[in-house]
Amino acid sequence: MVAGVVALGALLAGCGGGVEVSPSRTDGALPAAERRACERLVDDLPDAVGDQPREEVSGNPLAAAWGDPPVVLRCGVGSPADFTPLSTCQEINGVLWFVPEGQITDQGADVVATSMGSLPRVEVAVPAALRPPQGILTDLSDALRAQGRTPDPDEPCS
């Protein structure tokens, strides 16, 4: 589904209509405190990540995008379906990121990294053309860390 968001976003970005991003969760599913934290985060995100400039976004007020093909961030997402208590996360500048193993080993795959261990949870889709994602995730980790997020003891990483 996220790859579809990125592909659709790339198509729309090329047409000058901005990047269309699907909602982070269904209406009403995001607690009010997380929604407010996401709104602050999106407002404070950088004008560029890596060397990709920020793009206009529609369809999700809790989202941001950079570049073409776009890097897409959605704030307030749930846990990834393939995340388990035994999953390994990568720490980048104080933020834990979960990336499914298949995306790590397949260098031709898009990367969908999800912040873990704190709320609100953020999902970042990085197109394969912009791999490796570390520089992008470093820029975004700095922005997330500056928000003073709430610890999430229910989603530990090993």
Image: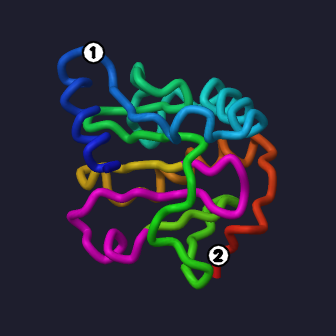
Task: Identify the residue at horizontal 60%, vertical 30% (top origin).
Answer: 42
Question: If the image is split into quadrants, where does the C terminus sit?
Answer: bottom right
> Which secondary structure, mark 1?
loop
* Residue at horizontal 66 percent and vertical 27 percent from the top: 39
**Magenta region includes residue 119:** yes
Q: Amino acid at mark 2?
A: Cys
**The disc labelled 1 sits on which kind of residue?**
Gly
Image spot of residue 25 (x, y percent): 52, 41
Residue placed under numbered mark 1 in the picture: 17
Q: Is residue 96 above or below residue 18?
A: below
Question: Residue at the spot x=40%, y=38% of the render?
Answer: 51
At which x and y percent is residue 64?
48, 31
The answer to which image quadrant residue 104 occupies is: bottom left
Q: Which residues are magenta?
A: 100-122
Direction from residue 8 to residue 22 in the image, left or right: right
Where in the figure is residue 3, as x and y percent of width and height? 28, 49
Q: Earlier in the sequence, mark 1 or mark 2?
A: 1
Q: Could you say which disc has been placed on residue 119 in the image?
A: none
Q: In the drawing, what numbered circle is on residue 157?
A: 2
Secondary structure of residue under mark 2: loop
